[in-house]
Amino acid sequence: MPDPGARPPERITLGHGSGGILTRDLVRDVFVAAFANPVLAKLGDSAILAPETGRLAMTTDGFVVRPLFFPGGDIGRLAVNGTVNDLAVSGAVPLYLTAAFILEEGLAGEDLARIAGSMADAARQAGVSIVTGDTKVVERGHGDGVFIVTAGVGRVREPAPEGAASVRPGDVVFVSGPVGDHGAVIGAVRSSLDVAGGLESDCASVAPVVAALADAGVRPRFLRDPTRGGLATVLAELAHEAGVTIELREEDVPVRDTVRAVCDILGLDPLYLACEGRVAGVVPADQADAALEAMRGCAGGAGAAIVGCVRDAGPGPVVLVTRYGGHRMYDTLASEPLPRIC
């Protein structure tokens, strides 16, 4: 358990990245106190892990979100869940994480401790251990508070999703809940909009949703967490790789009214906004009902919906059938409409 007597420094100084006593105290009083586990406690140059049978999945990610704290989460919670989710949608059971911190001189120690606490809480919820890491400090004005770089290791649950090459016309497309929440929150906070209606980031682990699908015998052909570029970008990339068209039905895509309101004000499209706690996937049509039942019965999947289907290649990678019977084309954008969302 975290050490209740640990005290973070008042402010981060360049000395906290020097490898001396200040570094030792920072690691002990912030990171070891928050992430307490037997592997990390040894503080070796690497973590020595128990052997695992079968294939392993590994991922790495960097987090530079601005602002550091937002409704529903912060950069620490985002770093853990973002890494866990990349493992989960590859078909792996997440096991271990690493975390490297690039800190800016002058960062409040309480803010760093809060971020570490969020990471520890997210790791406990996801059932993973943060087993090793690193800390560096850069001069004031060169780091924007804190950046976090992670790596994650998981054990592959067989059979794993085969990916885009296995997708076929007639398959159905699902999402595990409302889309665009995270991007809408970040956009609203940056624009000083009042986030009414309790809108929060959807930042959470999707591992329970993926596990529920596996336990129900559902075998998705394709899984992805729709972060940068949102649902539309994930499906456009899938369509290009698989040589198909994805047809979405606007009335079936779950989007919160508060997200639509933020998008209307800022001129954004919710289908291009990032999610940080959702799964988008493709399953054979005969598994669609079982997939919905499995997702809706677990944490994070209550809003799951079938949103479209896979068609033979047509005029565009993604076609949205609007509520009025029209058609809107979606493709991969040249750049993210909201940079630094994760």
Image (cartoon, rainbow, N blue to C red):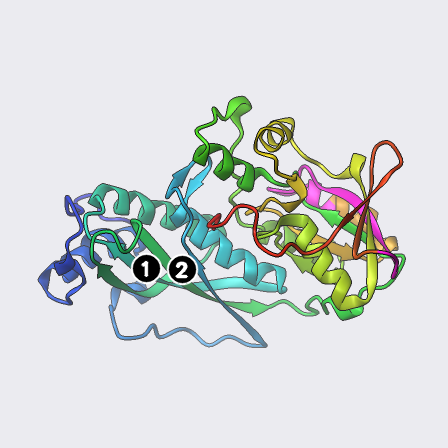
Q: Which residue is mark 1?
A: 37
User: Which quadrant of the structure image shows residue 47?
Assistant: bottom left
Give the x, y percent position of residue 84: 51, 57
Inspect the image, locate mark 1, and give the three-letter code of the amino acid beneath it. Answer: Asn
Residue at the spot x=61%, y=47% of the render? 278
Helix, strand or loop under label 2: strand
Residue 27, placed above or below residue 302: below
Q: Residues within 10 Å of mark 1 (few under 14, many from 20)?
A: some
Is residue 315 shown left or right of residue 224?
right
Q: Out of 31 and 5, give the one closest to the viewer.
A: 31
Inspect the image, locate mark 2, and give the three-letter code of the amino acid beneath it. Answer: Ser
Give the x, y percent position of residue 251: 80, 34
Give the x, y percent position of residue 323: 83, 32
| Span of residues in magenta | 294-315
Helix, strand or loop under label 1: loop
Q: Is residue 41 visible?
A: yes
Residue at the spot x=76%, y=45% of the render? 292
Q: Out of 116 and 219, give the one closest to the viewer.
A: 116
Residue at the spot x=58%, y=59% of the render? 88
Q: Which residue is mark 2?
A: 129
Q: Disc 2, disc 1: CB below 8 Å? A: yes
Q: Is residue 215 visible?
A: no
Residue 94, placed above or below residue 288: below
